[in-house]
Image (cartoon, helix red, strand yellow):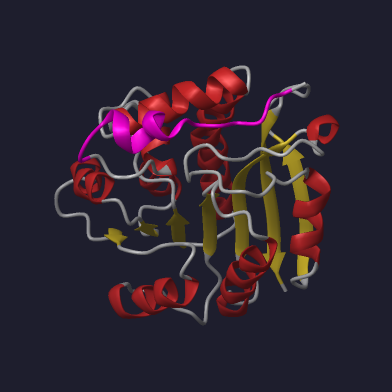
Amino acid sequence: MLPLLSVHPTDSPESQAPGDTPPRLSRLLDAVSGGKNHTLADMALLHRLDYFARGSISRALRAIPGWLADMVGNVVREGIDQLVVIGSGVPGGLPPGGQLHDIAHRVDPRAHVIYVEDDPVISAYAPVTVAAGNDRVRTIPGLLEAPQTLLINLRMNTLIDWDRPLGLLVCWPPELNDPSHCRYILTSLRRRLPSGSRLAIARLGVDDEFCALPYSSAGRWLGPHHLPARHALVQALQNLDLLDVEVVRLIPAHHPVTLYGSTAMAG
């Protein structure tokens, strides 16, 4: 049986790297891609989680950039030329031309790509990945857990046309697992999606056979709640009056922690 995750007070991520900021999903994605824009605290947490989860955390995280890349290509090929990407950062270990804005611009050079990121390290690195003179890629501050502020920032600091479809891609932070808060976030975002918009969410979850196991107390990162199983993710999207809801497992079964890719369209 998978043990409960527990961290001794003297073995918290913060204590291992004085001055480091708390771990962030975008920096962990940088770490598993081979980048350099992460901290000792991020690596300490990643090693600890992998120890308890039999290596499935790193495996799930490594699958996120590829899935997001596929989603970006599909959305832009459908004719949607404005994308908002929340929480993925710009992993420094990706090959040249492998960032999401690169993929979008290979399909449509006119596409606008907006990264929403609150981490100063990742935000500072993002412009390095953009060709000089390209004003169609922008990084703005924002937190998924504060969706109203995030939406205000998008309205004031970007050129998004809210009367046309957009692609909204979200890397869901594992610490956001309180059901009522998750409903609030999803509902807030759904209300602003124009008809015809595409929603794609990458989210760590538990495989169905492990869904009754609590996954808690990893410092303050995962929080006291369970990681969701597939049926909970399907239900959450179906409650938002979305079309073409699909939730698929993105790594093989029989791992304590897996990665789910959720897609839907705003009607």
Q: Which residues are magenta?
A: 2-19
Image quadrant containing the N terminus: top right
Q: Is 101 on the left or on the right of 245, as rendered?
A: left
Q: Residue 210 appears at what percent x and percent y?
A: 80, 31
Residue at image point 44% right, 75% down:
151
**Observer-nearest of 7 and 62:** 7
- Relative height, residue 78 to residue 97 (above, below): below
Residue at image point 69% right, 50% down:
262
Q: Is 225 on the left or on the right of 148, as rendered?
A: right
User: Image quarter for residue 122?
Assistant: top left
Residue at image point 72% right, 39% down:
214
Residue 220 visible, this angle? yes
Q: Residue 230 appears at what percent x and percent y?
A: 79, 45
Q: Is 163 on the left or on the right of 105, as rendered?
A: right
Q: Main secondary structure of the magenta part?
A: loop
Residue 14 is one of the magenta-drawn residues: yes
Residue 144 is one of the magenta-drawn residues: no
Q: Residue 233 appears at what percent x and percent y?
A: 75, 53
In the image as oriented, which residue stretches furthest toward the front? 9
In the image as oriented, which residue stretches furthest toward the left? 132
**Observer-nearest of 62 and 45:** 45
Residue 76 visible, this angle? no
**Observer-nearest of 218 and 193:** 218
Q: Residue 55 appears at what percent x and percent y?
A: 58, 18
User: Image quarter for residue 212?
Assistant: top right
